[in-house]
Amino acid sequence: MADEVILLGFWYSPFVARVKIALAEKGAEYEYREDNLWDKSPLLLEMNPVKKQVPVLIRNGKPISESVIIVQYIDEVWKNESPILPFDPYKRAQARFWSDFVDNKIYTLGKKVWLSTGEDREVAKSELVDGALKLLEGELGDKPYFGGVRTFGLVDVSLIPFSSWFYGIEQWANISMEAECPKLVDWVHRCMKRERVSKSIPDQHKLYDFFTETKKDWF
C-alpha cells in the first residue's frame, strides 16, 4: 500500500519551501495543504501541538516537524533517489553545521534587516552581508553547489529559499546583492535552473509585497 504523505505549510515560508524541494528531489508524491499563520487549522494544532508551526510532514498519520529534521527524514525514507546528505560522516557533520548556520544567522539577520530602520538597519545589513553571506561564499568557493561538483545537498536546500528574500533586502537595505555577493548570486541562478527548486520557492516580488504589507502588523 502506498504511503499517505501530507505537507502542511504556508506559501511564503522558506522552511516549507525546503521540504517541497526535498520531496521534489526525491520524486515523492504528497498532498500539500495550505494553512494560515493567523488562523491555524485544527490539523496543524493536532500534529504540532508544541510549536504550532509549519512545516509539518505527516506520513501515514505520523507527524514530523522542523524543516531540517524533515529534510533529513525525507533523505532517509526515500534513500534511492538524489541523496541530500553525503555518505561520509565528516561531510555530513559539516553539512549540518552550515545548515544550522543558515538558520541561526542568515534568516535571523534577514528578518532583522526587514524589521529594523535607520542605524539599526545599517548594522543588520553589515552583519548579514559581511558577517554571514560572505562567509557562505567562502564555503561555496568555486563549487557549483555547497554539496560539491554534482551534489545539490542539505546546505543548498537550506539556503536557496532565502534567495526569495534578496529583492526585499535590496529594497530595504539599498544594496545590490550581485555587487556584494556575486558568487552567491551565480549559485542562485544555477539552483533556479533546477525546475524542482524554481517551482518550490515563492516569487521574490510577491514575497516583498507580502512582507511590506504584513510589516504593519509588527508596529
Image (cartoon, helix red, strand yellow):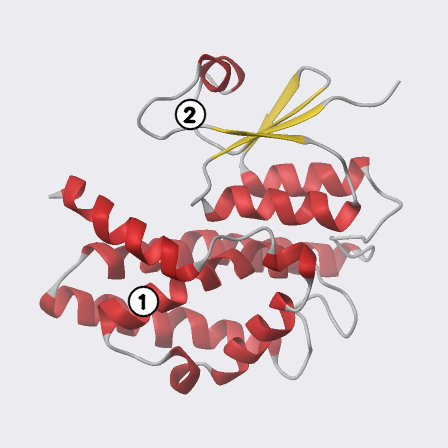
Question: Which percent across, then down, holds residue 145?
Answer: 67, 71
For residue 154, above or below residue 60: below
Q: Are marks 2 and 1 in contact (CB under 8 Å)?
A: no
The residue shown at (64%, 73%) is 190
State how far apart marks 2 and 1 are (Cα).
Answer: 28 Å
Label 2 sits on what residue type? Answer: Lys
Q: Residue at x 76, y 43 (%)?
A: 75
SS at circle 1: helix
Task: Work out whether 75 lies above or below 174.
Answer: above
In which quadrant is the C terminus drawn?
top left
Disc 1 target residue: 169
| Of the pair 69 and 27, the residue shown nearer to us | 27
Mark 2 or 1, which is nearer the eye? Answer: 1
Q: Which residue is mark 2?
A: 51
Q: Position of residue 59 (x, y in %)?
A: 70, 23
Q: Residue at x 40, y 55 (%)?
A: 107
